[in-house]
Amino acid sequence: MGKPYSMDLRERVVEAVAVEGLSRRQAAARFGIGEATAINWLKRVQTTGNVAPGQMGGHKPRTLSGSHRDWLLARCRERDFTLRGLVAELAERGVKVDYRSVWEFVHAEGLTHKKRRWSPASKRARM
């Protein structure tokens, strides 16, 4: 992931437009940044009064935690399940999750969902 431009550069671009009277495109050319970047910085100054970059990245808490986690663990241990079935049951309970997040939960908790029991290969397959 890339890093945001320095505050110094941002402030110089804004100053060039506000004080020196350059257009946004001229300021972008002078400082070697993209035109859209200069335009967005000046739009940011107009709306927030600051050129500081917004947050990049961060931690998003898991949807399947707390009481939802407890319910899901009990549900998985009580009877057989399919991942798509769990997604549907969670939706009925008002929890909006996708297939992938349920799969990651089941995998992290070590819950298996075998479709059939193991049986030895037929004689034909062994030959």
Image (tube, grey):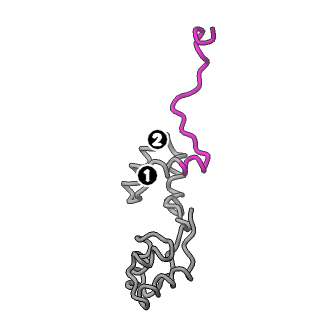
Sort mark 1 into few (<14), some (14-19) or many (20+) by Cα contacts within 10 Å.
some
Which of the labelled discs sits on residue 98, or is there none?
1
Identify the element where label 2 is drawn.
loop
Report the number of discs: 2
Residue 57 among those drawn in magenta: no
Question: Which quadrant would the N terminus be assigned to in this image?
Answer: bottom right
Which of the labelled discs sits on residue 77, or is there none?
none
**Residue occupying the point 55% across, 72% down:** 4
Q: Horizontal and vertical percent for residue 76?
A: 52, 46
Relative depth, front residue between 46 and 96: 46
Q: Horizontal and vertical percent for residue 92?
A: 36, 54
Residue type, numbered disc 1: Asp
Relative depth, front residue between 8 and 71: 8
Say above or below: 72 vs 56.
Answer: above
Separation of marks 2 and 1 at Cα, in angstroms:
13 Å
Identify the element where label 1 is drawn.
loop
Residue 123 among those drawn in magenta: yes
Which of the labelled discs sits on residue 82, or is there none?
2
Q: Horizontal and vertical percent for residue 32?
A: 50, 72
Q: Quadrant of residue 40?
A: bottom left
Say above or below: 23 vs 117.
Answer: below
Q: Horizontal and vertical percent for residue 126?
A: 63, 11
Is residue 63 rendered to the left or right of residue 47?
Answer: right
Is residue 29 rendered to the left or right of residue 5?
Answer: left
Sort mark 2 into few (<14), some (14-19) or many (20+) by Cα contacts within 10 Å.
some
Say above or below: 5 vs 117.
Answer: below
Residue type, numbered disc 2: Thr
Start and end of the magenta stretch?
A: 104-127
Q: Earlier in the sequence, mark 2 or mark 1?
A: 2
**Residue occupying the point 60% across, 16% down:** 121
From the image, state whether disc 2 or disc 1 is nearer to you: 1
Q: Residue furthest bottom?
A: 19
